[in-house]
Image (spheres, rainbow, N blue to C red):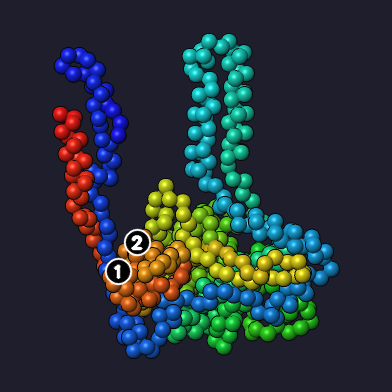
Amino acid sequence: MASLIKLDTTANIKLVPRLFVTSTHLLQRYTCKISASVAPEVLSDLEQAVIKPRKHPGIIRPNHIELPQKLSNTLKRIVGDHPLRKVLRDSVLLNSYIKSRHPPPTALEIENKKRLIVEEVNSEMPLERLATLSAEEAARWQRKREVKINKRLDQRTYAWKRIEYGAYEAIVYAIARAAQEYAVMKRVLSEIQMRDDKFTPRSYIDFGSGIGTGMWVASELWRDSIFEYYNVDRSREMNELSELILQQGQENKQIGLRNVFYRQFLPAIDTKYDLVVISHTLFELADKQQREEILLNLWRKCDGYMVIVEEGTRRGSELVNEARRLLITNGDEHVGETFAPCPHDLRCPRLSSLADRTPCNFEISYSPLRLSSDSAADRKTSVYSYAILKKGTIDDSSRQWPRIVRPTLVRSKHSICRLCTDGGKLQEVIFTASKHGKAAYSCARVSRWGDRLPISLGTPQPKPSNSITKSQQELQSAKSTELT
């Protein structure tokens, strides 16, 4: 209870009791109800106990990934005579630097920053004061002003430069990144294998192939069908190291895969490839124009699926979605659709609002490479952003299943899922057995970040809650009576 100062008819000060009624009392509360129906074929299998909820077809496996023992031993072997402690220290620094990368700033971004800095510096010397300066003092101020503007612009502009990989840097990259990049690629490419069992690629091309992690995974998943692996990386030392890894660290040993090729540039001829990969490479391209040229070139070579993977940072997410939007809107000649992670071809809802800086990313758990007894923990996690595009149209009835884009919150008798829907919206759904049925509730409860839910969502129906309670009515009545 507070008091309101008021004058009565005799001009005396009077204290009038005032009730503070919060805005929530004056506004109707809304609860969002949304229906969720399990896909008929999945519901039938669940009811007949053909599958259990924890193995429903929207689950993406694996959740934790380890490097194959043969690869792990090979990576330990390639360190050679380099001091182990130095390699480990440099690998930590390199990994940290890669995770903090930004793309090169555009001319427009630099221009906008400079404009703001000019306004900021000009405010230090108002026009009225500038008019009072002598010619010599005005010239001195102009020189000082230019120095301030250039210095602040340098400080606030990301100093992008391409990472150059020599022989030693390539080894450091392999030790720093092999385990986590292998885990990411295994998770991403496994989704294609799980959802499209008819896809048997005959050819594979990887732009920015690095040490060959994409090739390792592709050869595991489709070893019997792929007859050509084409790796492109501008670093000759990276290509040599990738080939040495295939030889298990022994230069004279024969490569176990057939038809493996290494080049420093994309082939000029218009050869088609069933599986096209560009992984952890977009940050290394000099500007947006070069990114678009490379992406469109790879898209023309694609005759099946194209996979784009980057770091799961905000900037990485923006680059992946920039590439996705470019390719799926690139005219009728090279039409394609989004296979994953989006259940739609619309703009990513995460990037629709400049106020929301949350990236569209996913998490994978992996076992880091252990080079010494004092190595780090046995389990780490890495976040990544990705897009899988399919040339032509996608013939998959499950494509519109919503994707879980943040960790599922499992609570007593209910589970909360944050979903990306086929309408290009983010939707939070609170699943309960009573409202959505046992099948939908059970599937939601066992699904994790990155999985899909085999359900179709209805239109959210905002409904006002029960009308204003009796106590709230009394408060409003008392307020109106005492203020009259």
Q: Residue at x 53, y 57 (%)?
A: 313
On residue 427, which mark appears?
2
Locate residue 236, reporting x and y percent.
Answer: 71, 66
Front residue of 19/57: it is 19
Q: On the rendered structure, is 387 left or right of 401?
A: right
On residue 457, which mark appears?
1
Locate residue 349, reporting x and y percent.
Answer: 38, 57
Mark 1: few/some/many CA within 10 Å (<14, 14-19, 20+): some
With respect to residue 30, does 201 lie above or below?
A: below
Q: Earlier in the sequence, mark 1 or mark 2?
A: 2
| Residue 399 seen in render | no
**Outermost residue to the right:** 81
Front residue of 465/418: it is 465
With respect to residue 87, does 246 lie above or below?
A: below
With respect to residue 463, does 208 lie above or below?
A: below
Question: Mark 2 and mark 1 in contact (Cβ < 8 Å)?
Answer: yes
